[in-house]
Image: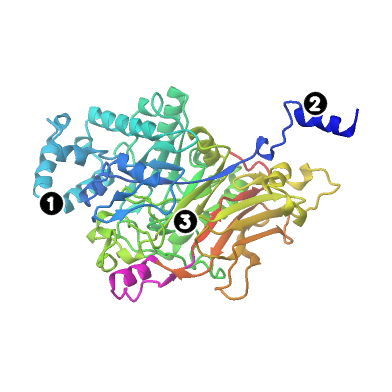
Amino acid sequence: MTWWMAALLVWSGLGSPRVTADISYSPNAAAQTTQLYWGDLHLHTSNSADAYTMGSRITPDTAYRFARGELVEAGNGMSVRPRYALDFLAISDHAEYLSVYRLLDAEDPRLAGWPLAAEWLELLRSDKMGELTMAFADAFQNPSPEKMTPPAVVSAAWREAVTTADRHNQPHLFTAFPAYEWTSTISGDNLHRVVLYREGLGFADQSLPFSSQDSNDPEDLWASMASYESATDGSVLAIPHNSNVSNGRMFAPETLSGKPIDRSYAEARAKWEPLLEVTQVKGDSETHPILSPDDRYAAFERWDEGNIAMTAQKADWMFPQEYARSALTQGLHYQRTLGANPYLFGLIGATDSHTGYSAVAEDNFFGKFRSTEPSAERMFTQMAQVLNDNWRLSASGLTGVWARENTREALFDALRRREVYATTGSRIQLRFFAGWDFTERDLQRVPVSVAGYERGVPMGGTLSPPDSLPQQGHSRQPTFIVIAMKEPDGADLHALQVVKGWVDESGRRHERVFDVLLAGDAETDGAAALRTVWTDTEFDAAHHAVYYARVIEVPRPRWTTRDAAFFGVEPPKAAPRLIQDRAYSSPIWYGASIQP
């Protein structure tokens, strides 16, 4: 047989090598291959009582259309479209009075006979929206039976929410998660959680949302989630947010009932709350200059004057119990003392917008409420007329998820295993792996994640102690693959960092921020991509530790600067002119038996 005949047989497949089912030419056929998907897990529509009284009339259907990239009309009459469409969305309207104010306005007969409905309808017809807003706030801070929505109304409203999510859910194209917000607020201190479901009709609609009128205690929320999973065989998780305005309650050393945190509490919290919303429209909760005085990027989008209701001022003792970095390190202390870590959370970003629009770009920011949509006045008024100044609002945030496919199941599972990260609005691409023998050569693998998954763990995972690995060919210092790429039409990247927290033999907590790669000496020096392999040369195998990657952009105009130019006004003197958006990976933990 001539060479060309053999070649023809191979080309035609008749003479090709035998291929088995366990090998593939495609590197993306590997079981651990993941793709990056972008979304918002915390958005409100007119079905939220406060959004309705603040002027929003945007329905969930319109919110989903906007998320898919459609052009819609905002409450201020302007046309609005996102810069990029989202891959997934969770509309998380408040469980407390879900759809009630909208139904009141429509004089829905299902509210007939409820005494509170008649009282509130009179306020609504008199345009006394401020009083209605306060009635909503009072209901979840001071729950009582007569203030509870009739169960039939709650059931119908929740089924409608789940049905709408199912209608917009298109596997592999767009994921719509059923969700609601549990709005626990103690004396104005924030303990809110988004409750997210893996399944839709037939599961999520089989039990009513657990509202703060049922209980303000997160342990009771977890018990309701456990009951749901037991009854339906479905899956659910909770995501705390705005720890920065909890006035020390979010990561307090005692439970809400006043008991010291014990092992059972730590295990329950780690199980039901695998994520923390670390950045959103009401500021950033990564860290604070009081906690991290040596971190030059710690003073970012601060909301640090009081609690969410602005009814109590901030005291220094509260800060360690409010910010993600200090909580992550405190979790290592609990691991040592209790044998369980309550703060095994990954990091996500979301909007908490009450406009129905997840519009977070600095030059496309549509605020939190109808009154904070673009206008010449919005920077100079207070949020909801009684809360913080509107210029403090952050055009934030987004969640990046590394999942095998864009389906509810794949995305939810990635969220639960914490292979996710937060950005403050930019679509920065970020990979973070930890192992014991990564080298610069691994950066040449295509894709790099092959090496990361084969010989390490991704963001959200735990790194086994070196004693459990073969000694030959392995260092006793962990190595990290850290790769970041800028948003395609966004700002360049300036700094690639690793943040480390650890607890020493005496139980003292420590933190350090490492500049693993800079684009240049000046803050304005930037690059389209930053990638490196970094080794923790200060590693001590005896210390439990936690690591996460942080990426910092070069400075660019903040939304307040954009508003000033667009509307021809001078911004408030205290309003920042520039911003350095960033991304936070979920942590990687080192330490024996650290998984819940």
Q: Which mark is residue 321?
A: 3
Tell me how far mark 1 sits from mark 3, CA to CA.
37 Å
At mark 3, the secondary structure is helix
Please tell me which of labels 1 and 3 falls first in the chain. 1
**Residue 80: percent from left, percent from top:** 32, 54
Q: Which residue is mark 2?
A: 18
Relative image position of residue 581 (x, y in whole percent): 49, 63
Does residue 541 appear in the picture of this structure?
Answer: no
| Total numbered badges shown on the rendered structure | 3
Q: Amino acid at mark 1?
A: Lys
**Residue under the image location 68 percent in, 54 percent down:** 481
Q: CA distance from mark 1 to mark 2?
A: 76 Å
* Residue 243: image location, x then y, percent: 43, 54
Residue nearest the observer in this picture, 545 or 549: 549
Callout 3 environment at 10 Å: few (<14), some (14 to 19), or many (20+)? many
Q: Where are the magenta residues, as a range?
A: 559-580
Outermost residue toward the right in this view: 1
Q: Quadrant of the C terminus?
A: top right
Q: Quadrant of residue 168?
A: top left
Q: Residue 128: which numbered mark, if any? A: 1
Give the image quarter of residue 469: top right
Q: CA distance from mark 3 to mark 2?
A: 60 Å
Of marks 1 and 3, the one in the foreground? 1
